[in-house]
């Protein structure tokens, strides 16, 4: 579900924070150029839930690399959209190489999650796809995980409104609302959250994603709605709140992009 077949291996991502009222106007503008993602159709506010369980070392190396602005950095996460035991989950590496975002992803069946987190590579029937690139992505995920001794740390959840091109993967726009974060160290892929940190309440995270050149109509969108590029790292903001070094309400970290 969600982005199962829409992730691009390499792309640019620009993030903006916009008020809810402006997001409704942005929606109308986007719909002149892109189609609503199939998973948002018929959903309240045209959005579907996204859940990610982020991994990090006990001394939070991945978190600090982002805080320190390392040019070449990565995040490790398990993405899922439901608690349905038959639904696949996705082990993902999200890298930033200077200005480019690179994503590697492997879908697995839920019984494989625990053994992967324990450092064991699952049997082929527990992989969703036979694609060798997906298999290699999981191998690399485990290598990085074991190298850092990374473990489940933070559960990030939000509602995503997504728009896609009908003829290629060159353009994709998402608007994320109601971002909530909570510590989760047991590796459980749950959707319910107890006393989560609220990262966004009155604002929406707008992401313009593209390969190749920045399209003219993206530029028009930014100018018409007076959008200012900023950071909106959900995992980092949630971890800051967890560590007690949080910013004022609705003031997402503006200096970090990933």
Image (cartoon, rainbow, N blue to C red):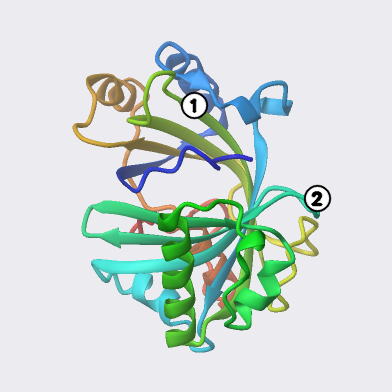
Residue shown at 21%/59% (left/top)? 98
Residue shown at 46%/26% (left/top)? 164
Of 243 and 183, the residue lying toward us: 183
Q: Are marks 1 and 2 in contact (CB under 8 Å)?
A: no
Q: Indicate the position of residue 194 as horizontal and vertical percent values.
A: 80, 64
Which residue is tagged 2? 84
Q: Indicate the position of residue 146 as horizontal and vertical percent values.
A: 48, 85
Is 37 located above or below residue 48 in the figure? above
Residue shown at 79%/53% (left/top)? 83
110 left or right, relative to 247:
right
Q: Is residue 116 visible?
A: yes
Q: Indicate the position of residue 257 as horizontal and vertical percent values.
A: 35, 55
Is 59 located above or below residue 43 in the figure? below
The C terminus: image quadrant: bottom left
Is 194 located above or below residue 230 in the figure? below
The N terminus: image quadrant: top right
Mark 1 surroundings within 10 Å by alpha-carbon count, few (fewer than 14), some (14 through 19), many (20 or more):
many
Of 99 and 203, the residue lying toward us: 99
CA gap, disc 1 and disc 2: 25 Å
Q: Quadrant of residue 14?
A: top left
Q: Earlier in the sequence, mark 1 or mark 2?
A: 2
Which residue is tagged 1? 163
Disc 1 on helix, strand or loop?
strand
14 left or right, relative to 1:
left
Mark 2 surroundings within 10 Å by alpha-carbon count, few (fewer than 14), some (14 through 19), many (20 or more):
few
Which of the two discs, 1 and 2, sits closer to the camera? 2
């Amino acid at each position: 579900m969600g982005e199962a077949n829409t992730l691009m291996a390499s792309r640019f991502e620009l993030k903006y924070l916009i008020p809810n009222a402006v997001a409704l106007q942005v929606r109308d503008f986007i719909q002149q150029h892109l189609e609503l993602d199939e998973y948002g159709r018929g959903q309240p506010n045209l959005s579907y839930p996204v859940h990610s369980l982020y991994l990090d070392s006990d001394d939070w190396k991945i978190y600090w690399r982002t805080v320190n602005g390392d040019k070449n950095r990565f995040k490790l996460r398990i993405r899922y959209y439901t608690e349905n035991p038959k639904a696949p989950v996705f082990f993902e590496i999200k890298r930033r190489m200077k200005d480019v975002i690179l994503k590697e992803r492997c879908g697995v069946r839920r019984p494989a999650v625990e053994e992967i987190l324990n450092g064991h590579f699952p049997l082929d029937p527990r992989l969703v796809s036979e694609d060798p690139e997906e298999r290699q992505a999981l191998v690399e995920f485990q290598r990085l995980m074991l190298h850092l001794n990374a473990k489940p740390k933070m559960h990030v959840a939000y509602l995503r409104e997504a728009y896609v091109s009908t003829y290629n993967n060159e353009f994709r726009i998402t608007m994320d609302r109601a971002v909530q974060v909570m510590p989760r160290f047991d590796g459980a892929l749950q959707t319910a959250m107890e006393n989560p940190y609220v990262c966004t309440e009155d604002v929406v995270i707008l992401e313009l994603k593209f390969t190749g050149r920045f399209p003219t109509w993206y530029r028009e969108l930014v100018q018409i709605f007076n959008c200012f590029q900023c950071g909106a790292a959900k995992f980092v903001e949630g971890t800051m709140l967890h560590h007690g070094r949080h910013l004022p309400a609705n003031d997402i970290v503006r200096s970090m992009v990933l």
